[in-house]
Structures are given as structure tokens and as C-alpha cells.
Image: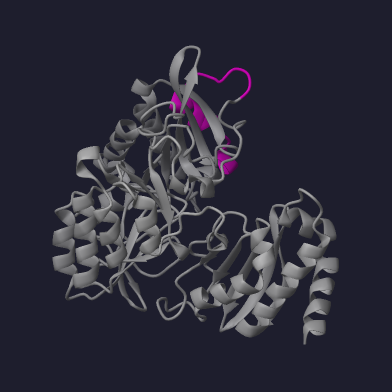
Amino acid sequence: MATENGMTPRVREACPGVAAPMETADGLLLRLRHPIGGLDAGQARTVAEVARRHGSGQLELTSRGNLQLRGFTAAELPAARRRLEETGLTDADPRREAVRNVVAAPVADRDTEAVADVRAVAQDLSAAVTGRPALRELPAKVGLLVDGGGRARLDALAADLRLEAVATPEGLRYRLAAGGTARTAVVLGWVTEAEAVASAVRVLERFLALREGQAEPPRRLAEAVACFGAGPLVEAAGADAIAGSDPVASRPSIRYRDLLGPEPGGGWVGAAFPFGALTADQLDGLAELLDPEAGGSLRLTPWRAVLLVGARSGAGEALRALGAVTDGGDRRLALSACVGAPGCAAGSTATRSDARAMGEAAGVLLGAGGRLHVSGCDKGCGKPAHPAATLTAEEGRYTLRVAMGPEEVPLRSELTPEAARRWMAALARVVAEERQEEEQVEETMQRLGKAVLAARVASEVKDAG
């Protein structure tokens, strides 16, 4: 929520925007909400210009498909806002901006395996939520999702409310579900395309009604289901029950790394940037690769990558020259980290340089499919779902936690960055020695158990000196 001076405080659950930027250690942070349908070349160039001229020139792709611009001063803010408003990507009203949290499948219009182009439904849902004063009372973190299926579907992205297009014997239907990923969300039923937005709005209105009068009102729809059961939301949805197996929950998992590089059908070219961080110059470079005559646009994804639709010939080589990653097997994609120090006042470590060092030390673990996340504090900003290992800092010292089933268990605390690097190297060696054929990194660690794994890693650290 914005304060009286229009700024968003640095607190858990805060959601900065352009109308309500957040104060950080490196200046004001502006967040462009997920642009449904992407950025055209002109919009991308304007954003790059604003970042360079009025901010630090540093940008970040987020895990909700948003784009963050860093390093603004209060003096530069009005001019930056005016230029961004000209793109049509922002809301001048901070209350409208705060609830414009609709993420759409990025390339459902170009994906030959997609069921439907969902851009219009997503735009209508966004307009319905921001246009109703009552829905502007939604908690800031409530996120909505509209998915069209296909190769670039959003199954792994958790959302408070999901609309997922499915081809059924009766025609196109949307599965309406609440509070989770495609596999874990509570299904509310089938709705037609014509009914989809109205049904979703009724569910959100019922969620707000359930919050009234509660001493500690649920902040998310999953919490509302846990408190009141799914019945009130199912009733509000007015959807048809899904008979038989759920075709959405039973779909195979997607490896988003496989969407990088040129798409075999020519629908897009995918590129990622280490830690989702890029510069204004790199964004300008992406804009230059878009062909307006081919409907070129830059689609932002929730896996911190961009998909270039209507790209010029030779885009793959040009992307690599820009410093982008186009190879899904690149180990840098297995690393994630918050901005850390000095960009964030809460961060007590230089997370991204530490993460690079940890990644080099833990190369075997990352190559075997594990992920490592490094946090500068306990808020866990930018943390992906289910990393194999997490390093969380407090006052300059790291705690190493590893995934064992659905839980993260601590292996060691009070590690200096150098000690953490040694522990990551040792952990990688133990996993490499113990990992059985076809076994996931997390499965290996769970099979060994916390006590055995901690003892083995400690012994490796000691032996390595």
C-alpha cells in the first residue's frame, strides 16, 4: 500500500508500481505490471530510455512477468512517470495499479499447441478488476492468471485465481481454480469463454466478503479456502462441475529452459538473462531485433525470460552478443538471487556475486538439475519454487538449507560467504557420489536424510581443508 507521499514502504507483502514506487537502498524502484500481449519495439525503447535517463539503467525481469526499473530519485520521478504513461503500460491511480495483477500465457497466439489466444480474456479480466472500486480493496499480492495451454503454458506459476483454456467435447471451456499451481489449485468448475470474466469477478467479490469482520482476514484465496472451505467460492463461481479426470492437473510438467532459443515452429525466439537482470542498453538491443512488419513484440514471462515474437533473421546470434542466454542447458539458469547489497537495505551480503561463486563451486549439483537460490535476508524475494539448496543471509552470514520432500531443512548456519562456497562444493561432491541413475538431486538428499547428509558434507569440508 502506498504511503501519503506516494511511496510503497519496504515491507513484506508490499507491491511497488510506477504510481507508487518503492524506496530501496539504490533509489526508487518502479515496477511495470505484466504487459498482456508484450511490449512493441517503441514501448521497449521508451522504457529503456526512461531507465537510462531518469534511473540507474538497471532493470529486472520478475517471477510474475513484470519489469522493474531501478535507481530513480524523487526529482526524476515525475518525468519518468510521464514518459511511461505515454506507453499505455501504466496506471496513474495507485489503487488501480495495485490490483492490476493479471498474468497471461505469453505466446498463446503464436503457440501452435495452445488451445486459445487468451489475450482478450486477460485484458477483459484486468479491466474488470481495476474498473470496480470494490475490487481495488483486494490485498496487494492477489494474483490472477489466464492460460491458453500449449508449450509455453503457466502450469507451474501459482496464482490466487486461474482461468485455463481447455478443449472439451462441448467446445472451448476455461477451468476456474483457486489458490495454487495447475496441479494444486482448488477447482471451482468449468466456464465458457463468455462467462469466464464475470465468474472470476464473482469469486473475487465473495473472497472480499469472506474477509469482512475477521480479526485476521485471509490475504490470499488459498487461505480463504483453508478457513471457510471451497464451498463459498464454488457457489459464487456458478460454474459447471468437472466430470471425470481433470485434464489440466494431469498434464506433464514443462521445462521452461526448453523454450529458449528459436522455437521449432518459428513462433518465437527465447532468451534469458542471469538473475533476470538486464540493462537499458540490452533492452534497446532487444527492441532492435523486433520486426514491426512481422508483428514484433517482446513477451515477458514468469520464468524471468523474454520471448521475441516476430524477430528479425539472425536473432539468436544477436541475442548471445547482447549477453543473453539462449541455451537451456546453461548452468547460469540454475542460479537465482535477490538484488542483495548494496541495492537493498535489508540485504547484508552481495548475493549475486556470492551466487556466481557458489554456482562455480556447486557446478556438479547444478548440472544434475538442482537449483540454488541466494537471499540477502529472510524475505526470500525472487525465490523460485522448490530450489534444491537455499542460502539465506542474516548480518552477513548464511544459513544453508536443502530441499527434502516438501520441506527445506537447515544443514549449517553462520557461514561466511567463503565458508558457504566450501559447503556448496562439498554438497555437490556428496550428491555426485550418492546420486543414483535417473534420481533427482532433491531425491538423493531426501534418501540420505538430514543427519547423514550434514555429516557427510561436514566431513568433505574438513577433508578439503
**Residue 299: in sight, yes or no?**
yes
**Residue 65: in sight, yes or no?**
no
Q: Tell me if 106 is positioned left or right of 246 in this view.
A: left
What is the x, y in percent for residue 373? 57, 65
Residue that appears at 48% across and 44% down:
159
Quarter of the image where one finds residue 321: bottom left
Q: Tell me if 210 is positioned left or right of 396 in this view.
A: left
What is the x, y in percent for residue 107? 38, 38
Residue that appears at 40% across and 38% down:
204
User: Does residue 64 sit above or below 150 in this rendering?
Assistant: below
Quarter of the image where one finds residue 9: bottom left
Q: Find the magenta span and give its range.
A: 225-245
Residue that appears at 62% across and 67% down:
390
User: Does residue 420 sit above or below 135 in this rendering?
Assistant: below
What is the x, y in percent for residue 217? 48, 50
Q: Confirm whether the magenta stretch covers residue 12.
A: no
For the N terminus, the quadrant is: bottom left
User: Does residue 377 sit above or below 380 in this rendering?
Assistant: below
For the C terminus, the quadrant is: bottom right
What is the x, y in percent for residue 142? 42, 48
Q: Confirm whether the magenta stretch covers residue 237.
A: yes
